[in-house]
Image (cartoon, helix red, strand yellow):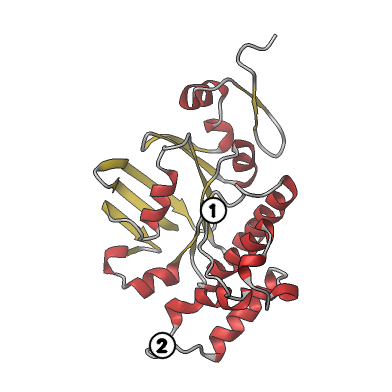
Amino acid sequence: MNTLECRLLNVNRGEKLVVRDLSMSVEKGHWVALVGPNGAGKTTLLHAVAGLLPSTGDIWVAGQDVRKLTRKQYAQQVALMPQQPSVPAGMSVRELIALGRTPYLGRFATESSADKEAVEAEISNLDLERFANRQADQLSGGELQRVILARALCQQPQILLLDEPTSALDIGHQQVVLELVDHLRHEREITVLAAMHDLTLAAQYSDQIMLLAQGNLVEAGPPRTVLRADQIGQTYNAKVEVLSRESGPAVIPVRPNSR
């Protein structure tokens, strides 16, 4: 079953067409990595799927045309983990995570016992108990990423959108966050659509790669099929070597005029 389908999707930012006639389908529980050079349209595509940008074409989530969903219904299906999250000053970690329950709040916007239980469950699942009462804007980059992930998971989404989830993290914290997402998507059958900068990490964690350039889909398929040295070189205007590893292809930059 396909959890996400886009058909001939076009997305503008201002007067500029950023995503052009893009079609894709993503199976339930699969991880699809969006890769491509800066300006390829990765973030714009994520924001369109999240319902944050207007688009033409069709988006279907869990077999439903999103145009027929209310904003609350949409947010119960799709959650976005942004690259640069906005963290209100003075808000505690627990309060920030609780924002993920907003799509489920009733008429008077009061939390039910089920909402509170969902928040505490994600705090426990992501090992956030020791700083649940701290101010969120005082956390390190790795800690904050886990908190924002917990907020997204509190929406209990079928589709999790990640915008460069490891861009501000060191190697150790990159592995922690990606392993956590991978564990949770298998455990909960969550579909993951992630814009990823590191091609090697994208290859290790994704089931499918979508290579974008200037808003167009260049190629989609398994990492070993898409991540070829000639294709990467042409798309990124870079010289690379692609090594075959058991965990997936490893993309190594090569100095253009190295001896």
Question: Callout 2: helix, strand or loop?
Answer: loop
What x and y, as percent, mark residue 62? 40, 64
| Residue beneath the point at 41% across and 88% down | 106
Q: Residue furthest front?
A: 89
What x and y, as percent, mark residue 56? 24, 51
Q: Earlier in the sequence, mark 1 or mark 2?
A: 1
Total numbered badges shown on the rendered structure: 2
Q: Rounded to the nearest whole Å, what is the CA distance between mark 1 and mark 2?
A: 32 Å
- Crowding at dot 1, Cα within 10 Å, few <14 / some 14-19 / many 20+, comes out as many
| Residue beneath the point at 66% across and 66% down | 138
157 or 134: nearer the viewer? 134
What x and y, as percent, mark residue 170? 71, 47
Residue 30 is left or right of residue 11, and the answer is right
Q: Are marks 1 and 2 in contact (CB under 8 Å)?
A: no
- Crowding at dot 2, Cα within 10 Å, few <14 / some 14-19 / many 20+, comes out as few
Position above or below: 242 against 202: above
Position above or below: 10 against 133: above
Residue type at mark 1: give it: His
Residue type at mark 2: give it: Gly
Location of residue 132 by image quarter:
bottom right
Where does label 1 land, which residue? Answer: 30
56 or 39: nearer the viewer? 39
Residue 11 is left or right of residue 153, and the answer is left
Location of residue 187 by image quarter:
bottom right
| Residue beneath the point at 45% across and 52% down | 26
Residue 254: numbered disc: none
145 or 90: nearer the viewer? 90
Residue 106: numbered disc: 2
Position above or below: 105 against 182: below
Quarter the N terminus occupies = bottom left
Question: Mark 1 against mark 2, which lies toward the viewer?
Answer: 2
